[in-house]
Amino acid sequence: MINAREHTLSAIDPLDGEALLQHVSALAYNIGPRPAGHDTEARARTYIRNALHEIGFTEVKAQSFQTSDSWGYALGTPFALSITGMLLGRLGRLGRVAGAILGAAGAYLTWRAASGLRQPLDRVGTQRTSANLIVRIPPTGRYYNTMVLLAHTDTNRHRESFSSTRKASLATAATAMIGLQAAGAVAQVTGGNWLSNVITAGQIAGLGAIVADEGGNFVDGANDNASAVACLLGIGAALQAQPLQHTEVWLVFTGAEEVGLVGTHALLDEYGEQQLRRAGFLNFEMVGRGNLAYVTHHSGFSHLSDYAPDDDSVALVERTAHANRRFGVFGTKLMMLDEVAALRRRGYRGICLVGLDVDGWPANWHRDTDAIGNIQPEALERAARFGLAVLQTLDAEAH
């Protein structure tokens, strides 16, 4: 005999917007800000694990790794190296050689940070423990495909660099940082003291701007990215009730995305070559408000670090959007650095779904307004249902 609670749970559509909103509220309102490696990020994983168990998933893999808790280390360390190089250049020829090397290294590291590549000096900051949570849903019939759904659990700071008047110039600012560091290396070779002084002053100002941008509090992250976590939980519940026939689905709740896509790199390090080289990846980002889009070209966070989804992923999402026009999903170019960057830099397939507000940007992106009151249940439902539709399209075409 089914008890009342079991009957109530079975009667709830897991993709209903209000049901998804409850997950967002639990993460963003009850738990609140979830910096990478902090206790609240761990509490978010506990909530996700319990929700998965309630859905019926008994095997949830926790993949731990070490991380810093802010991307300021990835941007500040290269500037510190470059400034040190400028100072060494005052000590003579050997100092200029060392300074040129440090300046070139700084430019290279900043480019890597703006491009989604793993940072060689990512151990500079205080190390904390974060983790990915992984659930695998096997097909009921003959296996043909693997699709990995991604949603990160951590949150970023309130950043003035993402204000409505400044975020459009982020790529230009990051490109200028790279240019300043590269110019410092050149100045060491040419030995121009006046030029070196000007560049040093510019680099110190750049480092100061990075430090100032680190002064904001961590945000609740209702849209970025509790909305995506909610969608994966909803899709997981739908697939638990009715698995796909030919497609294995991985639900991956990544940690430490906001500090440099660390969770995705950890996932690929352990599972990439052996199990996920042929997989497709669908990343959910800030889907709790506005219209739903898939990103056809990312500028990255500099004009030197653009990337794009693979053609097969674009075609799959386009076919799904065409067959499900009621969702109003469209393709767009966007200045954005998401987990698809880590995938594409390492030769994997992947594409990003993102919600866009009326101004064409993700809503409340890295702002203290990213709270539960600014989430739209209908946007959550649209993203979850479209994500499931993408999986069903892939599965129906399997051969």
Image: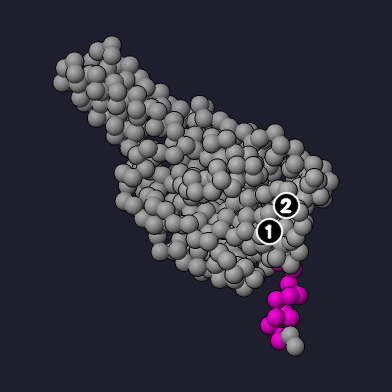
- Where 230 falls versus 304 (above or below)? below
Secondary structure of the residue carrying tag 1 is loop
The residue that label 2 is drawn on is 143
| Residue ID at (64%, 42%) | 278
- Where 103 falls versus 224 (above or below)? above
Magenta part of the chain: 3-16
Towards the viewer: 86 or 117: 117
Neighbour tally class for label 2: few under 14, some 14-19, many 20 plus, Cα within 10 Å: some
Percent across and percent down for residue 190 are 28, 11
- Is residue 89 visible in the rendered image? The answer is no
| Residue ID at (49%, 60%) | 62
In the image: residue 61, left or right of residue 149: left
User: Mark 1 belongs to which amino acid?
Assistant: Pro
- Is residue 126 visible in the rendered image? The answer is yes
| Residue ID at (29%, 26%) | 102
Q: Which mark is residue 138?
A: 1
In the image: residue 298, left or right of residue 367: right
Q: Are marks 1 and 2 in contact (CB under 8 Å)?
A: yes
Tell me which corner region of the image, top left, top right, bottom left or bottom right, holds residue 139. Answer: bottom right
Alpha carbon distance from label 1 to label 2? 8 Å
Magenta-colored stretch includes residue 10: yes
- Where 388 falls versus 168 (above or below)? below
User: Mark 2 belongs to which amino acid?
Assistant: Tyr
- Where 165 falls versus 383 (above or below)? above
